[in-house]
């Protein structure tokens, strides 16, 4: 029998797609990678995933795992060879268990993040992972990329929220590592090896996640700042006044807000344009009145100190959602505006104003008229420092000619600060070259030995990461 026939026998013919429109699986979210799969397989259980891996390994065929296909580095779509099997986890989306006393939720990997958040909310609890792609991205994808998002400042990356995993190995065996333990020092941490491995070490089929109590009140505000240094000062003030109640601190540069205003004119514009706008969120267990009082006192102190020159606090849930909508619409507004070079960099927060001033100037000098769309998770020292072609120019041509030089300039400028060229989105296919060029030989050798130990045949997502 051929591999396709074997897969059909294992999963049922309906779950092995080889014909028709497979674009949704073969083209990535940014439409930068267009692959061709030998077949798209949709297993419905962990045992079926294991069967697919065993069959593919025996046939010498490699596998690309895919969740919501919202990844931004070309890691979750097949290459153009037509020889890779695309394994979609989309049918594996069950909530397996919720343990309220232990504050844990166990879900299958294909569970969409928003559905997992809802399962927690239905039990009066909070799953504190939030990304603009939460309506489509999956828990498996979130863990495979160690996703960040807007709550990292308080709760950490996806890694910090994961207590256990169930994984199908490259040999087609199942590692049953689920469980709700907060302490477990029995040998090497296998869970942490798979988290952030982008489908190259194992296929995540389920996860146990940490939950938290739902806050009694969530406050949102926008604050206008003259400089990034003022934003950093505001962050320090917010941390000292709100402590663990500070759950979000996002910045938006002028250009980012202008793009949102242009492409989504229906969204609110509660503050005038400013060089930098900060979106602050505070979550409080006590209640609305105390939360509002503390929040307003913080903003009054920031206004008095001069780090903020204007601010507005949302008065209702609808207003709060409106403010978040502005922030979350930036990537979409950028996509509407046209092709652009995306960077998700991280540095010590204290170094960000200097880095941005220096890099803005260097880019402007080298590529006059270039538009820098900077925004993101300042509270984590993580900026989406994106570069859009000059207004009115041919963006495709600009990228074709200059993308590499733009990347080199942006990434080289991180070196004096020991910054990272990929804070959130990972390596995938897009940043393999950067990883090879910028990681130390020792780090690369360790990574290669891990890959060789866990996937000696190179069955899982070859050509990605390493
Ligand atoms: P996919 O895109 O399907 O896959 C991503 C990678 O993980 C691929 O390498 C794939 O092979 C692997 N993979 C997927 N599922 C599994 C599995 N079950 N087992 C093993 N490997 C697997 N990311 C952030 O970190 N922070 C953000 O704030 C953020 N905002 C975003 C906003 C928008 C509008 C978009 C489009 C993306 C954003 N992202 C962000 C990137 C992306 O949403 C996240 O990386 C997300 O975690 C990917 O999940 P997914 O299910 O779509 O994964
Ligand atoms: Zn982000």
Image: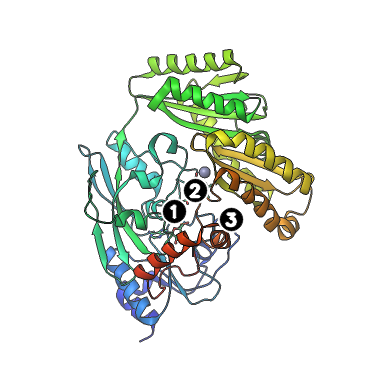
Whether tag 2 and tag 1 are in contact, CB under 8 A, the answer is yes
Q: How far apart are marks 2 and 1 (CA)?
A: 8 Å
**Where does residue 410 sit, x and y in percent of width and height?**
65, 48
* Secondary structure of residue under mark 1: loop
**Where does residue 295 sit, x and y in percent of width and height?**
46, 18
Give the mark nearest the N terminus, 3 or 1.
3
Mark 1 surroundings: few (<14), some (14-19) or many (≥20) residues within 10 A = many
Residue at the (69%, 47%) spot, across then down:
388
Q: In this view, does 208 lie to the left or right of 150?
A: left
Mark 2 surroundings: few (<14), some (14-19) or many (≥20) residues within 10 A = many
Q: Which residue position holds label 3?
A: 30
Q: Nearer the viewer, residue 403 or 295?
A: 403
Q: In which quarter of the image is the N terminus?
A: bottom left
Q: In this view, does 224 lie to the left or right of 382?
A: right
Mark 3, mark 1: which one is toward the viewer?
1
Q: Which residue position holds label 2?
A: 424
Q: Which residue position holds label 1?
A: 145
Q: Distance between the residues labelled 3 and 1?
A: 17 Å
Label 1 beta carbon within 8 A of ligand 1: yes
Residue at the (53%, 13%) spot, across then down:
300
Q: In the image, is residue 408 above or below residue 296?
A: below
The answer to which quarter of the image holds residue 332 is top right
Q: Distance between the residues labelled 2 and 3?
A: 16 Å
Give the mark nearest the N terminus, 2 or 1.
1
């Amino acid at each position: 029998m051929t591999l396709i026939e074997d897969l059909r026998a294992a999963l049922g013919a309906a779950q092995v797609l080889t014909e028709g429109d497979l674009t949704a699986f073969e083209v990535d979210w940014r439409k930068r990678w267009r692959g061709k799969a030998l077949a798209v397989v949709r297993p419905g259980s962990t045992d079926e995933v294991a069967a697919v891996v065993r069959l593919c390994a025996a046939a010498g065929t490699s596998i690309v795992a895919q969740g919501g296909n919202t990844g931004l580095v070309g890691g979750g779509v097949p290459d153009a060879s037509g020889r890779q099997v695309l394994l979609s986890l989309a049918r594996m989306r069950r909530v397996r268990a919720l343990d309220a006393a232990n504050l844990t939720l166990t879900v299958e990997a294909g569970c969409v993040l928003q559905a997992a958040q809802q399962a927690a909310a239905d039990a009066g609890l909070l799953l504190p992972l939030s990304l603009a792609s939460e309506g489509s991205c999956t828990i498996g994808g979130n863990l495979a990329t160690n996703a960040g998002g807007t709550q990292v400042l308080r709760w950490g990356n996806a890694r910090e929220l994961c207590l256990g995993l169930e994984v199908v190995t490259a040999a087609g065996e199942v590692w049953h590592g689920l469980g709700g333990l907060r302490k477990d020092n029995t040998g090497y941490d296998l869970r942490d090896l798979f988290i952030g491995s982008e489908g190259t070490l194992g296929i995540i089929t389920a996860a146990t996640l940490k939950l938290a109590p739902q806050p009694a009140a969530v406050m949102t505000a926008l604050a206008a700042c003259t400089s990034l240094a003022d934003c950093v000062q505001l962050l320090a003030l917010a941390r000292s006044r709100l402590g663990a109640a500070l759950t979000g601190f996002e910045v938006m540069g002028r250009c980012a807000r202008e793009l949102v205003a242009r492409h989504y004119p229906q969204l609110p514009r509660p503050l005038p344009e400013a060089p930098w706008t900060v979106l602050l969120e505070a979550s409080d267990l006590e209640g609305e009145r105390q939360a509002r009082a503390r929040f307003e006192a913080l903003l009054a102190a920031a206004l008095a100190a001069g780090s903020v020159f204007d601010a507005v606090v949302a008065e209702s849930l609808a207003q709060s959602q409106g403010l978040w909508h502005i922030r979350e619409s930036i990537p979409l507004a950028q996509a509407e505006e046209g092709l652009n070079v995306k960077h998700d960099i991280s540095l010590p927060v204290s170094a960000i104003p200097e880095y941005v001033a220096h890099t803005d100037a260097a880019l402007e000098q080298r590529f006059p008229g270039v538009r820098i769309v900077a925004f993101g998770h300042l509270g984590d020292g993580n900026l989406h420092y994106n570069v859009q072609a000059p207004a009115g120019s041919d963006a495709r041509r600009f990228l074709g000619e200059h993308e590499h030089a733009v990347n080199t300039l942006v990434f080289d400028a991180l070196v004096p600060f020991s910054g990272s060229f990929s804070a959130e989105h990972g390596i995938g296919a897009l940043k393999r070259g950067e990883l090879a060029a910028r990681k130390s030989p020792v780090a690369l050798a360790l990574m290669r030995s891990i890959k060789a130990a866990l996937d000696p045949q190179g069955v899982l997502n070859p050509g990605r990461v390493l």
